[in-house]
């Protein structure tokens, strides 16, 4: 029997690589007729297979020459949240030569690695009937020589795959323990010390994070190493700007072996009370779409890949970073 995770990503890759004449046929094999697709800004909500092709896949095929998915993480499992169902979660890059404008990002005519996180619900006949997708368009801008923020907090890197090199359809085993660990971490993360930005249960002998943790963030935040790097490059600037942030409103939480993934649409609610990535405090209430992917080892979180819809967030703050 074909692994539902492998079948899903193979079907999606077909939508990038097949001939124009075959696109509709290939789409019918992987997308349900009434698929409910939620994209990052400016793609937004797409309803039905034709709308997904016109709003998501045809723009990618036009803007990137010979595009394909290069998957780093492909996991799947039953959703622990109320919405239920069997889901596939992926961290991937759309790889191609950036030859045309893509959702407002001008082309570079060079190789591009468009990072993307996605959650797909799989229905009874093996097709996708609901999806949530975030492509890091600010990072694509950075690759094309346009700096969307004027500042970078951490280190900008192309997202690596897991250090264990087993993230694509890992040997399936119960992921309950991995998801339990992540949920314990998330529960403790809400309360923090405003001076040290620490939270109980995160580090130390009984902490949820490994001492040599790696955290990979989107453009502007960048990536960092160990808890002190995470605090310096992301947590301190973020909670200083959004001190009342509350997260965890997730539609999907799955575990798969040593991996877990969670996402909220939106996950966070907060108020913009401090300067952030070049935008002065506005005092506005904001929401943030979030995707997190985790690798666990020896009872700790070793790696965390994070996708955030910052085009949508900055639009709420009054700034269109795609211009």
Image (spheres, rainbow, N blue to C red):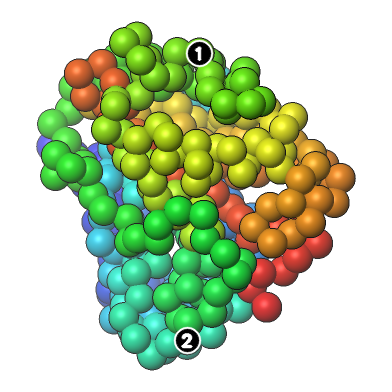
Q: Is residue 30 above or below residue 114?
A: above
Q: Give how far across and how far down residue 153 sits, in percent.
A: 51, 54
Label 1 belongs to which residue?
A: 200
Q: Is residue 30 above or below residue 144?
A: above
In the displayed structure image, the side of residue 295 where residue 179 appears, left or right: right
Distance from disc 2 to disc 1, alpha carbons, whole Å, reads 45 Å
Residue 278: name its quadrant.
bottom right
Label 2 belongs to which residue?
A: 107
Q: Is label 2 in a helix, a strand or a loop? A: loop
Q: Is label 1 in a helix, a strand or a loop? A: loop
Q: Earlier in the sequence, mark 2 or mark 1?
A: 2
Residue drawn at (29%, 25%), measured in percent from left and top? 210
Tell me whether the residue at label 2 lies in contact with that at label 1, contact meaning CB atoms closer than 8 angstroms: no
Residue drawn at (48%, 82%), measured in percent from left and top? 145
Q: Give how far across and how far down residue 239 sits, in percent.
A: 65, 36
Residue 207 in view in this figure: yes
Q: Give how far across and how far down residue 279 sits, in percent.
A: 74, 59
In the displayed structure image, the side of residue 166 where residue 39 appears, left or right: right
């Amino acid at each position: 029997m074909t692994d539902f995770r492998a079948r899903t990503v193979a079907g999606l890759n077909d939508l990038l690589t097949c001939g124009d004449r075959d696109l509709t046929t290939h789409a019918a094999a992987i997308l349900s007729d009434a698929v409910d697709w939620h994209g990052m800004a400016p793609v937004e909500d797409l309803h039905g297979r034709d709308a997904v092709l016109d709003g998501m896949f045809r723009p990618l095929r036009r803007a990137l020459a010979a595009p394909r998915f290069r998957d780093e993480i492909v996991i799947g499992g039953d959703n622990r949240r109320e919405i239920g169902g069997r889901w596939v979660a992926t961290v991937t890059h759309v790889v191609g030569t950036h030859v045309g404008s893509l959702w407002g990002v001008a082309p570079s005519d060079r190789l591009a690695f468009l990072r993307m996180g996605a959650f797909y619900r799989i229905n009874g006949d093996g097709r996708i009937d609901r999806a949530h997708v975030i492509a890091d368009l600010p990072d694509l801008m950075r690759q094309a020589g346009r700096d969307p923020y004027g500042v970078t907090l951490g280190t900008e890197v192309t997202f690596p795959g897991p250090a264990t090199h087993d993230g694509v359809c890992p040997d399936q085993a119960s992921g309950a323990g991995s998801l339990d660990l992540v949920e314990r971490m998330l529960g403790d993360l809400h309360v923090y010390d405003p001076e040290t930005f620490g939270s109980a249960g995160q580090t130390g002998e009984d902490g949820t994070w490994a001492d040599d943790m790696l955290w990979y963030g989107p453009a502007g935040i960048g990536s960092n190493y160990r808890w002190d790097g995470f605090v310096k490059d992301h947590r301190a600037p973020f909670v200083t700007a959004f001190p009342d942030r509350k997260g965890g409103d997730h539609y999907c939480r799955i575990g798969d072996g040593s991996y877990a993934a969670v996402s909220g649409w939106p996950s966070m609610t907060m108020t913009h009370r401090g300067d952030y990535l070049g935008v002065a405090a506005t005092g506005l209430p904001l929401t943030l779409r979030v995707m997190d992917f985790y690798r666990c080892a020896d009872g700790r979180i070793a790696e965390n890949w994070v996708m955030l819809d910052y085009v949508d967030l900055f639009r709420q703050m009054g700034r269109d970073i795609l211009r």
